[in-house]
Image (tube, rainbow, N blue to C red):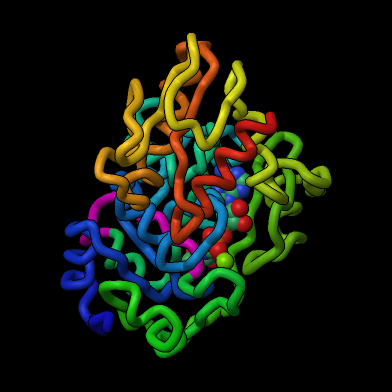
């Protein structure tokens, strides 16, 4: 069972040790892990039972920290100056040398960043001193948690700790904005659209149906490799670059020991490496269980593109 923490300093050690820590924010409780640790991020997906690798929100304690992982346009600067810390998430281009696991952004060139205002979350992020990836701390498809007991009841047996943060005051997820120009409202949430439009001096658009921001999974087809990708391959055909798993060896492997968490953590790097060769790609069979579902979902998209 997850340990309940009351001190942010103590809870930060869970993150530093590569563990999963749920923590209260002003919006909803987040399920956090060190965003630079691919294995820890993979365990977020495993704990939530997510059948897809949706990109996750990165939590940092201030604008300067955010500037280490993402680049800010003038519009992004205006929004962060006005609404951070607070319930606003910005989708920004990843900055070179960001150090995040590619699993965090599902291999996309952008990252969702937020600076929570909750004092406990602030203290946790300062004590930890690094970027924390955190989706809402609920099992996939269930209601977002606004109290520690909600997290304990639904995920308590799958995570390492919960930092008590009281009842969430906003109780609704953060508003997600692509600053643009043109600015796009990707998800309504804790910051009202009128306030955003006032700060930007222009109205916000909506994502195109099926666009990256409404359904990030869809964008993955944009990241289809240059050449064909073949799944369930037990050996490479002539000219193919082989990505192995478990007993099926390759030019590289997702996990030599057949560990699905390790495979999830290495998946996007492996696809980039394979794509850089411009050769057709073959991928070993991945069992359709646990994180294998999300891995196969990603591979099917790559194969279809
Ligand atoms: O209030 C919140 O935002 C909470 C607390 C814990 O901070 N977090 C939260 O995370 O709601 P989550 O994972 O449940 O929702 C994140 C949303 C997803 O819909 C995801 O698709 C989108 O953000 N997202 C993340 N990165 C993205 C990116 N690079 N491009 C487009 N959408 C992105
Ligand atoms: Mg959620």
Q: Nearer the viewer, residue 229 or 45?
A: 229
Q: Nearer the viewer, residue 281 or 192?
A: 281
Q: Nearer the viewer, residue 30 or 101?
A: 101
Residue 135 shown in magenta: yes
Residue at the image position 31 percent from the left and 65 percent from the top? 20
Residue at the image position 26 percent from the left and 59 percent from the top? 126
Q: Quadrant of residue 301?
A: top right
Residue 89 shown in magenta: no
> Magenta residues, as a range?
126-136
Q: Is residue 200 above or below residue 123?
A: above
Residue at the image position 42 percent from the left and 88 percent from the top? 153
Q: Position of residue 41 (x, y in %)?
A: 37, 53
Q: Position of residue 195 (x, y in %)?
A: 71, 60
Q: Nearer the viewer, residue 284 or 52?
A: 284
Does residue 237 appear to the left or right of 12 in the view shown?
A: right
Q: Position of residue 236 (x, y in %)?
A: 45, 21
Q: Is residue 45 above or below residue 304?
A: below
Q: Position of residue 254 (x, y in %)?
A: 35, 37
Does residue 122 appear to the left or right of 57 in the view shown?
A: left
């Amino acid at each position: 069972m997850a340990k309940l923490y009351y001190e942010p300093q103590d809870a930060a050690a869970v993150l530093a040790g590569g563990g999963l820590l749920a923590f209260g924010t002003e919006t909803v409780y987040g399920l956090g892990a060190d965003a630079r640790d691919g294995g820890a991020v993979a365990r977020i997906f495993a704990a939530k039972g997510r059948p897809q690798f949706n990109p996750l929100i990165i939590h940092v304690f201030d604008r300067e920290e955010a500037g280490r992982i993402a680049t800010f346009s003038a519009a992004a600067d205006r929004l962060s100056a006005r609404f951070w810390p607070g319930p606003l998430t910005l989708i920004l281009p990843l900055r070179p040398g960001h150090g995040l696991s590619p699993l965090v952004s599902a291999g996309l060139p952008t990252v969702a960043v937020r600076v929570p205002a909750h004092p406990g979350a602030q203290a946790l992020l300062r004590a930890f001193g690094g970027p924390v990836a955190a989706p809402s701390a609920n099992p996939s498809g269930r209601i977002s948690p606004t109290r520690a007991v909600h997290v304990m009841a639904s995920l308590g047996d799958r995570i390492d700790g919960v930092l008590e943060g009281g009842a969430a005051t906003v109780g609704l997820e953060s508003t997600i904005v692509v600053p643009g120009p043109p600015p796009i409202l990707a998800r309504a949430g804790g910051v009202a659209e009128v306030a955003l439009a006032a700060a930007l001096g222009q109205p916000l658009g909506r994502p195109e149906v099926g666009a990256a921001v409404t359904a990030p999974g869809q964008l993955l087809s944009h990241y289809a490799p240059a050449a064909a990708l073949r799944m369930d391959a037990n050996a490479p055909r002539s000219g193919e670059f082989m990505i192995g798993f478990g007993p099926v060896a390759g030019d590289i492997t997702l996990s030599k020991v057949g560990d699905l968490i390790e495979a999830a953590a290495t998946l996007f790097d492996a696809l980039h490496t394979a794509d850089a060769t411009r050769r057709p790609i073959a991928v070993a069979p991945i069992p359709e269980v646990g994180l294998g579902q999300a891995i196969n979902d990603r591979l099917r998209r790559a194969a279809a593109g």
